[in-house]
Amino acid sequence: MTTHPDPTVVQAEAPQPRHPPTVLRLIAVAKLGKALLFLGAGIAIAFLAKHDVQATLEGWLAWIHFDPNGHLFRKAIATVSNADPHQLRLIGIASFCYATLYLVEGIGLWFDRAWAEWLTLVGSSLLIPVEIFEICHHPGPTPVVVLLLNLAVVAYLAKRLRDRRRATSTGAAAGSTPAGS
């Protein structure tokens, strides 16, 4: 409250802008990071669709000082090399679509938009069965951690949306009371 020359007059302060919570900002940063990864993957796949896949991948691995003869890299190179250019283009398009989705989620969450919370909640919830399947078929600590993080994000966003809805309905109810009551 601010002071006024007349002590009987009370002036309300202007409402302070609401800053999104740190957890929401962390989720937004994670979504933006995923957007960058999928964008990079889409660009790389679009490039691979027009070049010798095996030679290009081996060159990239050598450039970043990874041994292209390692077991995992050999398996990855063989898998990607067996894809025809049409399949690579489809994978590239899917990568760009995911990049766009994660970019929209990240920006919306950063600016504390309810629609972004809903979009992220639905998208993250749809991944839970896939993550459970992954744990069942490829058990290990990484898929378990990914599932737990995803469950935490879903629970957090569900709570925020419920709280937001309650605050909106409480505000609407308070504003709808007749004057003088």
Image: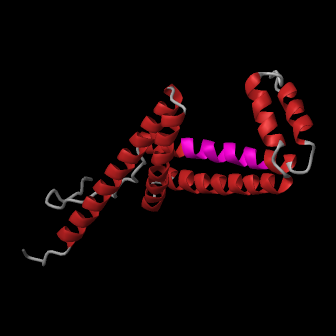
Q: Residue furthest left?
A: 181
The residue sitting at 19% across, 70% down in the picture is 173
Residue at 68% in and 47% down: 38
Q: Which of the 4 image quarters holds residue 117?
A: bottom left
Residue at horizontal 32 percent and vertical 50 percent from the top: 159
| Above or below 110: residue 33 | above
**Range shown magenta:** 30-43
User: Residue 148 or 14: which is nearer the viewer?
Assistant: 148
Taking the spot 14% from the left edge, 74% from the top edge, the residue there is 177
In front: 124, or 78? 78
Query: Residue 65's spot in the image, x, y percent?
Result: 82, 22
Question: Residue 87: x and y, percent?
Answer: 78, 54
Q: Is residue 74 above or below residue 97?
A: above
Judge from the rendering whether residue 153 lies leftward or rightward of residue 166; answer left or right: right
The correct choice, above or below, for 128 with respect to 149 in the image is below
Q: Residue 30, image x and y in percent?
A: 55, 41
- Majority SS type along the magenta span: helix
